[in-house]
Structure formats: structure tokens, C-alpha cells
């Protein structure tokens, strides 16, 4: 069987809508998925390790990577730079492995507009309500009131990009949203143009007809 080319699964949402939880569950469901670890200039939070949650880099080093073309996408969010290193993604694609991105709409847009755009499957995650979005942000107990207010103010702009995505999930019930995400990934993997072995298989079927 010919190895299929890996796809790029992009998850985006306003902060607190649940994309990171869905991404974690998807990685547990399919251990062959490669998670795209982003580089960032923000300082590590307690318990975070370089190379696991993020690649923590200084601003000058990050900007040098961008200038060298080593970032597949990058953006400045809340005063810090975030970006996806290019080389690991391209290597995974050559190996037939799918890569999962937990990124915002700006990063998603850059990847969709890149040379790898034809391999992208993009999913936007919406909260069931704005009140629930704020409740989830406060429930994380990670950010100050000022940071939460900033995230809430930014959420309307982020949500306005929902129509740019291939699929949209409303994350009111986590189990249901996860089941829908799995269905999307399974269907996209089965697309005709992602199964290069099909042409040879059909030629074999036609040869059987000819031999009858």
C-alpha cells in the first residue's frame, strides 16, 4: 500500500471555548497524531517545560527564525509571539503522519494560504454562549481579571472568522463535540485524493474484468 500524505488539522477558537481540551482528547484517541508544538516568546507558566508545552524563545531568536523562513506561521497575541516551526511538520507529512495544530485564526489563515494549504483541514470551535465562555475562563483560575477582560474583548473579533473554516463545532457538550471532531478526521482521511493506492487498486479490478 502506498503511504498517504499527512494532513494538517487546524483547531481554532476564542480562548476558553475548548480547543485545547479537544486537541488533548484527540491525541489520546489516536497516538499516531503529531502535535505541532509552537514556539513562543511568553515566559513559561508553573509546570511547563521547554519542548513539551512550547518552545520558549527570546524575541530576537524568534524573529530570526521568522526571517530565515523557519516558521510555518506566526502571530503576535497579547504582546507575545507564537509560531509553528516548519521542519517538523514537513517531515511528518512525508512520513504519512497527520499534524494537529492548536492555533488562533491568524496562524490558521497563514497555513491555509501557504504551499501546504491543500493539505489543511480546519475546524473552528465555538462556545455555546458568551456567558459560558467567561465562566470557563474564570474557572481555569490561571489569569487575572484584567487578562480575562482582555480575552473576552478579543473573543468577538476571533469568532468573526468562523466562516473561514472548513468545519465549525459548537462545544456545549464536550463528548459530543469530540465525537464530531473524530468523525471529521476520519472522513478527511478517507477522501479519494488522500488515498494514492486507490488508482492501482482500481486498475487491478479492471484487470480482473479483462481476464474473465
Image (cartoon, rainbow, N blue to C red):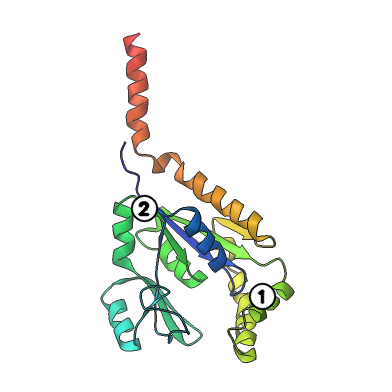
Quadrant position of residue 133: bottom right
Instruction: Tell me the quarter of the image containing the C terminus.
Output: top left
Residue 51 lies, in percent from the top left, at 36, 74
How many numbered circles are shown?
Answer: 2
The foreground one among 68 and 35 is 35
* Residue 49 on image: x %, y %: 39, 78
- The residue lying at 51 percent from left, 70 percent from top is 105
Q: Residue furthest top?
A: 212
Residue 177: x and y in percent read 63, 57
Tell which residue pokes out farthest to the front in this image: 47
Left or right of 92 in this view: 102: right
Tag 2–tag 1 contact (CB < 8 Å): no
> Considering only vertical position in the picture, is 25 above or below 179?
below
Q: CA distance from mark 2 to mark 1?
A: 32 Å
The residue drawn where x is 66% and y is 78% is 139
Determine crowd level at label 1: few under 14, some 14-19, many 20+ residues with C-alpha closer than 10 A: some
Numbered badge on residue 56:
none
Tell me the element at label 2: loop
- Find residue 136 and name its label: 1
Q: Residue at x 42, y 56 (%)?
A: 33
Say which residue label 2 marks: 97
Q: Which of the 4 image quadrants contains residue 145?
A: bottom right
Q: Earlier in the sequence, mark 2 or mark 1?
A: 2
On screen, residue 209 versus residue 151, left or right, reads left
Q: From the image, which quarter does the N terminus lie in?
A: top left
Measured along the vertical axis of the image, is residue 174 above or below residue 180? Answer: below
Q: Secondary structure at mark 1?
A: helix
Residue 64 x, y percent position in the rendering: 28, 82
Label 2 environment density (alpha carbons within 10 Å; few <14, some 14–19, many ≥20): many
What is the quadrant of residue 80 in the picture? bottom left
Amino acid at each position: 500500500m502506498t503511504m498517504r500524505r499527512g494532513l494538517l488539522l487546524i483547531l481554532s477558537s476564542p480562548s476558553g471555548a475548548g480547543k485545547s481540551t479537544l486537541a488533548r482528547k484527540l491525541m489520546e484517541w489516536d497516538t499516531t497524531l503529531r502535535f505541532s508544538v509552537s514556539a513562543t516568546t511568553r515566559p513559561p507558566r508553573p509546570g511547563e517545560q521547554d519542548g513539551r508545552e512550547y518552545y520558549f524563545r527570546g524575541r530576537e531568536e524568534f524573529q530570526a527564525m521568522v526571517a530565515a523562513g523557519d516558521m510555518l506561521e506566526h502571530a503576535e497575541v497579547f504582546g507575545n509571539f507564537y509560531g509553528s516551526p516548519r521542519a517538523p511538520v514537513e517531515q511528518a507529512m512525508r512520513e504519512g503522519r497527520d499534524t494537529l495544530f492548536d492555533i488562533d485564526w491568524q496562524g490558521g489563515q497563514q497555513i491555509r494560504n501557504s504551499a501546504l494549504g491543500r493539505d489543511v483541514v480546519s475546524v473552528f470551535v465555538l462556545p455555546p454562549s458568551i456567558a459560558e465562555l467567561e465562566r470557563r475562563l474564570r474557572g481555569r483560575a490561571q489569569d487575572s481579571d484584567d487578562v480575562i477582560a482582555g480575552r473576552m474583548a478579543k473573543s468577538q473579533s476571533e469568532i468573526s472568522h468562523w466562516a473561514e473554516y472548513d468545519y465549525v463545532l459548537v462545544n456545549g457538550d464536550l463528548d459530543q463535540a469530540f465525537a464530531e471532531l473524530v468523525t471529521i478526521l476520519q472522513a478527511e482521511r478517507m477522501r479519494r485524493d488522500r488515498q494514492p493506492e486507490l488508482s492501482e487498486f482500481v486498475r487491478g479490478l479492471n484487470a480482473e474484468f479483462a481476464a474473465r
